Image: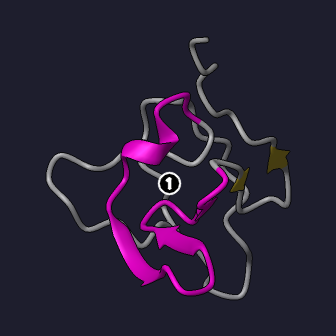
Amino acid sequence: MDRSTPDTTIQDDTARQPNSMCQHKPPCPTAFSTDREAAKPVASHPEQGWSLLCNGVLVFEDTGDLLPDGQVIAPHRPAVAV
C-alpha cells in the first residue's frame, strides 16, 4: 500500500482498526462496536471530564462519547430507581 494513500478500508465490529492506537492482545473493541467503552484509556483528564481510549473514542464523564468520525453518542446514564 502506498503510504500517501489513506486507508479507507471499512472494518466490521470484530476487526481491529488499522490506524488504531490499540496494541493490546487481544485487541480492544473498535470505535464502532457496541462495547467500544471497554477499550483501554491512553489519556485521562478527569479534571476536564474526559478520557481518550485506544480505539480513538473520547469518553466524557456524563457518559457521552465522541467517535473518531465525529459522530456523537448521547449520554446514556442508567435510569435511577425511585
Q: Residue at x 80, y 59 (%)?
A: 69
Examine the image and state in which quarter residue 22 appears: bottom left
| Rendered position, 47 above or below 58 | below
Across and down, in percent, residue 34 comes to 55, 28
Residue that mark 1 sits on = 17
Q: 24 or 42: nearer the eye? A: 42
| Rendered position, 82 above or below 51 | above
Q: Residues within 10 Å of mark 1 (few under 14, many from 20)?
A: many
Examine the image and state in which quarter residue 79 appears: top right
Residue 3: say if magenta: no
Across and down, in percent, residue 45 comes to 50, 85
| Rendered position, 36 above or below 17 | above
Across and down, in percent, residue 5 comes to 74, 78
Would residue 14 appear left or right of 9 to someone viewing this image?
left
Q: Residue at x 66, y 50 (%)?
A: 9
- Which corner quadrant holds the C terminus? top right
Residue 58: say if magenta: yes
Element type at marker 1? loop
Q: Residue at x 42, y 73 (%)?
A: 21
Examine the image and state in which quarter residue 48 appears: bottom right
Across and down, in percent, residue 41 comes to 37, 68
What kind of residue is marked 1? Gln
Residue span colored magenta? 33-62
Q: 13 or 79: nearer the eye? A: 79
The furthest residue to the front: 82
Q: Residue at x 71, y 88 (%)?
A: 4
Q: 17 or 63: nearer the eye? A: 63
| Rendered position, 6 above or below 10 | below
Would residue 69 appear left or right of 79 to someone viewing this image?
right
